[in-house]
Structure formats: structure tokens, C-alpha cells
Amino acid sequence: MTAPAAATGTATATTILDAQLGADRAAIGAALQRISDRYLEGIPNVVADAIRYSLGGEGKRLRAILCLAAYRAAGGTRDATDLAAVLEVVHAYSLVHDDLPCMDDDDMRRGRPTVHRVFGVRAAAAAGLAMVPLAAQCVARAGRALELPEEACGTILRELMRAAGAAGMIGGQLLDIEGEGRDLSLDELERIHRLKTGALVTASVHLGGIAAGAGPDALNALRGYGAAVGLAFQIADDVLDVTATTDQLGKTAGRDRALRKSTYPAQLGVDGAVARATALVDDACASLARGGLLTPALERLARFTVSRRS
């Protein structure tokens, strides 16, 4: 029996989209390898090795792929892979420091020992610090390759550093640590998640829009989408911490409970947390659709944040 034309068309579109996202992920991996090859000369060997190790982990590359999807949705037509890869440099740095004994003290990340377990705490701390100026160097080079105006390059760098700094990831991490052992309200928990995880996810789509030359309305829509998706991603992480195994996650399961952290499943139950994350994704997609910016890739990536298993 021949499949209905609509069903066949949907299956074909899904296959094409999967191939595009897979190609983007491979391209980001190649860009991170180029960064390691190009920029680590002159850095002490153990620190350079720690950076290579952190950048080479088998991550989802979600932030970089979101950047590429937003760039294309906003009308970008060039290869923005090198710019998108910078987001993974910043994300990798955050994971290196997040896993340190003075932070979450974790032994496994992305299915293998954490950086400080392989190279030592001092080398891991130094590697994380070195990856921040490394990201700035990469932004400058990627901006020139895209022939972006100097003003746009400056805006991209400021937005990236803001997302990575005290008003973003670092601030969120501090609030997260201070909240251990306390019963936080949902508002307090949401603030932590929007900073610790959401800030860089928001920056990912915002930077893609800036690089594409998007106008203020489009940039606002992308920021709103990124903020909702970033919060949904962290809520899903909270759920996976109590529902998945260490093998499935590639990192130690049950760490939130061990560290006595407030989480969405603890506050709302697993089903309630999933419902909250799903509603955020629905709102994010509806907002972009109203502005004519919702592409199949951006919708797929948003829904993946909730449906993923690791």
C-alpha cells in the first residue's frame, strides 16, 4: 500500500531536518577542533590538554545549533559555524568549573571523567579561566569571517560576556550554591535557572539574530524564545536527574538530591515539572510563529529540550 502523500511529505521533511541538524552538529565539532588547533599554542601543556579535553566531549551542541538555526531564521545566508562554536567554548568552560570540588564536585560529565579528575583541580580551574578570553578571540575572528560591521561584533561580544558573567551563568551558579539545603520558592528557583542555564541559551539565539542583521522586533522575539527554551531545558534537567540513570545521562544521576537542591520536581512533582516545561516551549514557539520567525529547526530544537533523555 502506498503511503498517503501528506504522510510521505512529512517523513521526508523530517529526514531532511534531521540530516541538517546532524550536519550542524558535526560542523560544530570540526569548528571546535579548529579552535583547539589554532589558539592553544603557548598555553601550558596540561592546561591546553584540559581545554582540548573539555571541548572534545560528546555534547549535544544545542547552544551552537540554536545559534545557527536563529541566524538562518533571521535571514542569514553565510556559514556562521565558527561564531556558533564560540557558544560551546563558553558552555564547556562553565561545565569545567561547575564540576569542581568547590562547586558541584562531580566525577562524570558527558560519559567520561570530569576535567579535574583527569588533569587535577588547578589545571581544570586554569583551563576554565583561559576559555573566557579564548571565546573573545574566537568571536573577533568569526565576526571578521562573516564580514560583520564592527558595531555588530562589539555587540555580540558584550552579549556573550554578559551571559557568561555575574549577570548570567556565574551569578546563577552562585545563587544555586547558596540555595543548597534551603527550601526555595518557585520564583527563587526560576531566577536561578534563568541565569545559570537560560542566559547562555538566550544569548545563543540572540547572537544568531544579531549576526544575521535582524531588526529590534525580531531580536526581541528571539530573546523571548531563548529565555523560555532555556528555562524549559533546565526544568527538564531537574526531571532527568530523578528519572534517568547515570548511564543514560552521561553524568551522575541524583546529584540534586545529594546536594539538597530545590528543584522543579520537588516543588511540582515530575508530571507538573514536565507540564511547566512543555508550556514554556509552546509559548516560545507561538511567539516566534506570530513574528514569522518560527522554522522547523527552531521548533524541533525547542521541543527536544523537553523530550530528550540525557
Image (tube, rainbow, N blue to C red):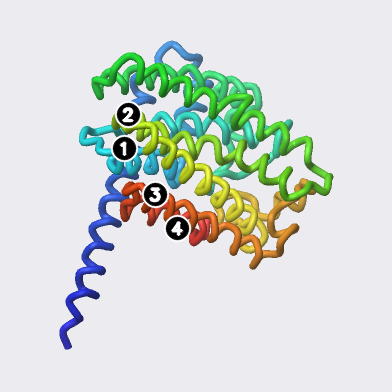
Task: Report if the CB atoms under discs 3 and 4 are less than 8 Å apart.
Answer: no
How far apart are the alpha carbons under marks 4 and 1? 19 Å
Ranked by sequence position, the earlier of labels 2 and 4 is: 2
Estimate how packed mark 1 is, as few (under 14), some (14 to 19) or many (20 or more) residues with alpha carbons within 10 Å.
many
Left or right: 13 with respect to 260? left
| The N terminus, quarter of image | bottom left
Q: Are marks 2 and 1 in contact (CB under 8 Å)?
A: yes
Q: Secondary structure at mark 2?
A: helix
In the picture of the structure, the residue carrying the numbered disc 4 is: 303
**Secondary structure found at label 4:** helix
Residue that label 1 marks? 71
- Which residue is found at the position 34% from the left and 44% from the top? 25
Drawn side of residue 195 relative to residue 86, left or right? right
Count neighbours of disc 4 (C-alpha within 10 A) and say few if under 14, some if 14 to 19, many if 20 or more: many
Q: Give how far across and how far down residue 88 sits, in percent.
A: 44, 34
Query: Label 3 to label 1, Cα distance in Å?
Result: 14 Å
Q: Tell me the residue that label 2 is attached to.
A: 211
Q: Percent position (x, y) of residue 135?
A: 44, 22
Sequence-first tag of 3 and 1: 1
Residue type at mark 1 is Tyr
Q: Residue at x 47, y 43 (%)?
A: 226
